Image (cartoon, rainbow, N blue to C red):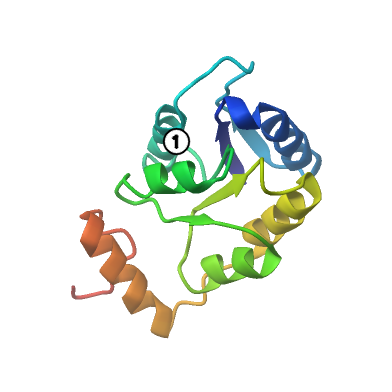
Amino acid sequence: MKIAVAADHAAVDMKDEVVRYLKELGHKVDDLGPFNKDRVDYPDYAARACDLLVKDEVDRVVLICGSGIGMAMSANKVPGCRAALVHDAWEAEMCRRHNNANVACFGARSQGIEIVTSSLKVFLESGFDGGRHAGRVAKMSKMDGSGVNELPGE
């Protein structure tokens, strides 16, 4: 799987650990930075990563900022992105199985690397259940105008 990873200045260290972890798992990683702790604006990094996702240049996106909240809010402004702020492995599984999330967001100031990596592993290994959840995801896609995962005939 090819994964884009981006952060803000508050999460550079965790981003670097996540990039190493993903590579150890055998994934191709596009590290979008930042590469130092100089102040940056998280919406810029979320936009760069999500742009790669909606252009089908990556399969998933991982975004990390201090709380994860700003990254999730920014990513969800990009049509075709379904970002979830993930706190644990159960949420990682549910956001994939029920919501077909394609962006996982984490908080470097609120989570340890062990929780992030274990949650990320589940996020990447879990699939979308479809079925009764497909219609809900299609409705979300209509809301952002992307039409991604629309049901047939809609």
The residue that appears at 55% across and 48% down in the rendered structure is 105
18 sits left or right of 35 in the view: right
141 sits left or right of 42 in the view: left
The residue that appears at 54% across and 45% down in the rendered structure is 68
Q: Position of residue 14 (x, y in %)?
A: 71, 35
**Residue 6, relative to residue 74: is it above or below?**
above
- How busy is the neighbourhood of tag 1: few (under 14 within 10 Å), some, or many (20 plus)? many
The residue that appears at 37% across and 39% down in the rendered structure is 55
**Residue 126, relative to residue 111: is it above or below?**
below
Q: Position of residue 63 (x, y in %)?
A: 55, 41
Tell me the residue that label 1 is attached to: 46
**Mark 1 residue type:** Ala
Query: Can residue 136 be seen?
Result: yes
Looking at the picture, tell me which residue is in the foreground, 30 or 48. Answer: 48
Q: Position of residue 136 (x, y in %)?
A: 34, 75
Q: Would you identify the image quadrant in which residue 34 lies?
A: top right
111 sits left or right of 66 in the view: right
Q: Position of residue 17 (x, y in %)?
A: 76, 34
Label 1 secondary element:
helix
Query: Can residue 150 be seen?
Result: no
